[in-house]
Image: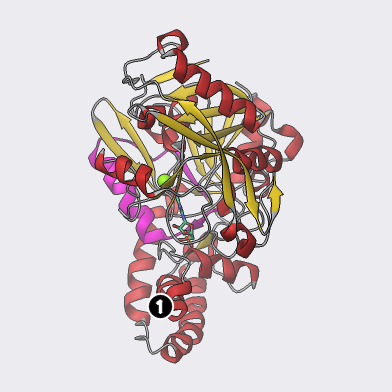
Amino acid sequence: MANTILVGAQWGDEGKGKIIDVLTEQADVVVRTQGGNNAGHTVHIGGQKYVLHLVPSGILRKKKVCVIANGVVVDPVSLVKEIEGLSKLGIKTIGSLFLSETAHLVLPYHRELDSQREILKGKNKIGTTKRGIGPAYGDKAARTGLRVLDLINPERFKKQLAWKLKENNEILKAFGAKPLSFKQVHGAYREAGDFLKPYVTNTVILLHEALRRGDDILFEGAQGTFLDIDHGTYPFVTSSNTTAGGACTGSGVAPHRMDRVVGVMKAYTTRVGEGPLPTENAEIADMLHAMGREFGATTGRPRRCGWFDSVATRHACMVNGIDELAVTNLDGLDTVAAIRVCIGYRADGKQFDYVPNDIEILGRCQPVYAEFPGWETPTHDARKWNDLPARARSYLKAIAELTGARLTIASVGPGREQTIFV
Ligand code: IMP
Ligand code: MG
């Protein structure tokens, strides 16, 4: 299978968790390289549902090495909870899960600052997951962050945390929020540090040893292209590079060692949180929500929904270098009589065939639609390309062609078996 970067081609929640789980069968090592526990990857195996936030989805298969690499921001207390949850389900992590020494920490003041900034922004809020992701990456860039190697060094952690809390408590007081207690934070995080210590290692060395052995590595992206801090709809983005390059900087594996990029996208569009979404449509949102679909895996929020946007996915293809496409949630459109696909935008008397950078312009963009006849047949039992209705096949071919990449996977439901290799 070679070394694969998997990215979301839309606004996150493209169904990456399931595709990662499927591709992991052929991988030896699975790596998370960016984001934090803002991510929620849902995987269904034999009637059991797993929601993973920080631990790579590879953990659900035996004998896979799973790595939380340097580019991730880690809330140690939340990671411990996730590991304990997996352990209750009979999933072993020790010896298969590895945590980078240089990953930055998310601490309670990051979460508190995330919430306070959102409150202050009022109706201009980003709609973050309030997991402290932005402030944690902010500290990293400002060179004032604490890292995993600080957490597992008790003396150093104590000193650094005392200083950080002093500074952040002043800021929290200025927001009118309650300051945090050193004793409480220190106690909880030191305990998590002791728990996590056996997982901590130099993951750059580990990954390069794997490369020398000829192992196949899967880099699992979190969030999606339009939430990328550089290429997304700034400021309505997350704080990491969710695009393919983030897999290199976030892991220490060089670009020329990567063999392919797989882009995952839904057969329609969704977004959680605020910010422009040109193809947003109330009717399709009501339909999907009534089916019990499209509620956030991390926050439970109903996702905003719209038609497939090929202007956006073509852009995603370009900035990620997507070679292969996996289209998920095809079955979400099973009951639609006439399916629309956005093939261009119109705003201010101009036509756009790319995503404008100015989100005020993007916010004014009216989609230009092409219409496809729906198949109006359930697809969730399809296992092969030819099991799909002819109209579903035409639709898939059309959106892949508009996106400009090769369709290799279509998914018709959450189960591992509901996967069609094209
Ligand atoms: P943050 O990452 O919590 O700072 O949130 C910033 C924006 O990214 C918000 O619009 C979130 O809803 C969105 N976001 C963050 N993580 C995910 C994800 O895993 N899936 C979908 N949206 C996400
Ligand atoms: Mg998700």
Crowding at mark 1 (Cα within 10 Å: few <14, some 14-19, many 20+): few
The answer, for residue 58, to whether it is visible in the render is yes
Residue 67 drawn above or below residue 214: below
Measured from the top left, where is residue 212 in percent x and y? 68, 28
Residue 127 spot, x, y in % from top left: 43, 64
Depth order, front residue of 153/396: 396
> In the displayed image of the protein, which residue is found farthest to the top?
386
Q: Is mark 1 within 8 Å of ligand 1?
A: no
At 32% across and 19% down in the image, what residue appears?
A: 377
Quarter of the rendering containing residue 93? top left
What residue is at 38 percent from the left and 30 percent from the top? 333
Left or right? Give the position of 199 relative to 80: right
Res. 24 in view: no
> Residue, x 38% and y 74% (percent of image)?
186
Of residue 417 and residue 157, the one placed in the foreground of this image is 417
First to last magenta residue range? 70-99
Residue 177: x and y in percent read: 37, 86
**Along the horizontal axis of the image, is 409 left or right of 357?**
left
Q: Secondary structure at mark 1?
A: helix
Does the segment drawn in magenta span residue 100?
no
At label 1, which amino acid type do we have? Ile
Residue at the front extreme, as displayed = 349
Q: Which residue is mark 1?
A: 119
Q: Quadrant of the N terminus?
A: top right
Q: Is residue 357 above or below residue 46?
A: below
